[in-house]
């Protein structure tokens, strides 16, 4: 029964996302606008290093590891992120590895990530409102919802920062420092130590996933029920998850499998380095296709979670707050008033 309900919520979530392509286009545009300055800055640094040298010709035809090592040795800030691991599907694995190992990022990258998070926080209210109503709200209605929930979600973001800060600054060093060292101190088989590390990764990511689900359903309840207290929304989100543990877990697992499928397909399709002209545009297109697919999965998770909540505690299209409508001008009101 829980699986059937989760699949129904997933199908409904996919339908709602596909009915609002402007939302997907908007969040993709947000990623482009935020990442474009970094791409331009990196291009300038690479162009200054390569110039018209032979290394530049070799870089255009393939990976010049010797030049990469020389470039990385004197790089700092954003330039220090340029390495062989950013090529093709390796970039996805490198990001995953950096996330699991809590690797420190350059300040400029952290600043861009914070800017991206702020953009998502602003758009989240409008996105969830659009999916909850399951009908067109227009630009005015969408951005009105964004403005209403932005400051509420900022308060929720403070709690998120505290929780995730504890995970990465306290729990992660304890698990992979003290606990891992104690558990593997007497081990002589590397495979066993690797298995222990995998188990610790599973515990760590499981805790993160649980917190992520709680915060997402807190946002869903805040939007659908027009809650002003984010503490109350978080508590209500926990109550909903506790009362619907099986369908919520099944829906999250299905969405996680969708994300894994996107990663796998990109890993199989992503080309290696080298080439120019049409090949460079092919690499760019595949990369942007992966970004769009990853954003689509995230939006499907929000839309399907909203659908699941409405199916259990309300009804499809139910939102407590009235839809924002662009006011008519005084002239329009005068025309419509009977004489």
Image (cartoon, rainbow, N blue to C red):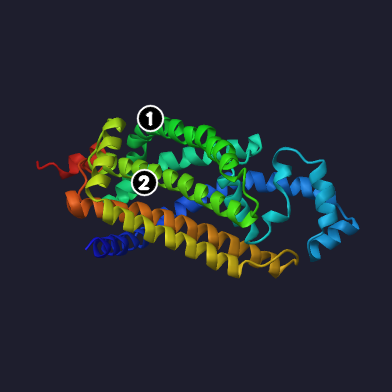
Distance in Å between CA atoms under marks 1 and 2: 17 Å
Q: Nearer the viewer, mark 1 or mark 2?
A: 2
In front of the other: 289 or 190: 190
Determine whether the residue tagged by mark 1 lies in a helix, strand or loop: helix
Relative placement, left or right, of 225 versus 270 is left
| Labels in figure, total | 2
Q: Which residue is mark 1?
A: 155
**Quadrant of res 176:** top right
> Residue placed farthest to the left in the image?
339
Residue 248: image location, x then y, percent:
30, 53
Give the residue drawn at x 87%, y 57%. Answer: 55
On the image, the x and y values in percent for residue 9 come to 28, 60
Q: Which residue is mark 2?
A: 213
Q: Is residue 184 above or below residue 262?
A: above
Count neighbours of disc 1 (C-alpha within 10 A) and say few if under 14, some if 14 to 19, many if 20 or more.
some
Secondary structure beneath label 2? helix
Q: Quadrant of the N terminus?
A: bottom left
Residue at 31% over, 64% down: 11
Q: Work out whether 206 lies above or below 162.
A: below
Tell me which residue sits at (56%, 49%) in the image: 197
- Residue situated furthest right in the rendering: 54
Nearer-the-camera pick, 12 or 256: 256
Q: Residue at x 42, y 58 (%)?
A: 256
Label 2, residues with CA under 10 Å away: few <14, some 14-19, many ≥20: some
């Amino acid at each position: 029964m829980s699986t059937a309900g989760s699949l129904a919520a997933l199908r409904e979530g996919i339908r709602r996302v596909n009915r609002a392509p402007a939302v997907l286009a908007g969040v993709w545009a947000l990623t482009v606008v935020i990442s474009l300055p970094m791409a331009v800055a990196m291009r300038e640094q690479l162009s200054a290093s390569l110039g018209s040298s032979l290394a530049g010709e070799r870089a255009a035809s393939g990976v010049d590891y010797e030049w990469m090592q020389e470039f990385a040795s004197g790089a700092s800030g954003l330039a220090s992120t340029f390495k062989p691991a950013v090529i093709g599907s390796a970039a996805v694995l490198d990001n995953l590895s950096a996330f699991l190992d809590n690797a420190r990022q350059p300040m400029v990258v952290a600043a861009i990530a914070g800017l991206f998070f702020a953009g998502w926080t602003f758009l989240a209210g409008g996105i969830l409102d659009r999916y909850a109503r399951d009908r067109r709200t227009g630009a005015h209605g969408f951005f009105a919802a964004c403005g209403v929930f932005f400051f509420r979600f900022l308060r929720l973001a403070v709690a998120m920062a505290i929780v995730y800060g504890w995970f990465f600054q306290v729990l992660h060093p304890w698990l992979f420092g003290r606990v891992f060292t104690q558990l593997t101190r007497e081990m002589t088989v590397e495979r066993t130590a690797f298995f222990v590390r995998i188990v610790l990764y599973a515990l760590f990511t499981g805790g993160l996933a649980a917190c992520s689900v709680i915060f997402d359903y807190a946002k869903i309840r805040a939007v659908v029920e027009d809650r002003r207290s984010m503490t109350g929304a978080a508590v209500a989100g926990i109550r909903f998850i506790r009362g619907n543990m099986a369908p919520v877990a099944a829906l999250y697992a299905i969405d996680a499998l969708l994300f894994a499928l996107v990663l796998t397909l990109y890993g199989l399709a992503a080309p290696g380095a080298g080439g120019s002209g049409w090949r460079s545009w092919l690499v760019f297109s595949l990369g942007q296709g992966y970004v769009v697919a990853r954003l689509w999965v995230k939006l499907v998770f929000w839309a399907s979670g909203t659908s699941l909540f409405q199916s259990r505690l309300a009804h499809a299209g139910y939102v407590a707050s009235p839809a924002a409508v662009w006011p008519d001008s005084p002239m329009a009101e005068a025309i419509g008033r009977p004489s």
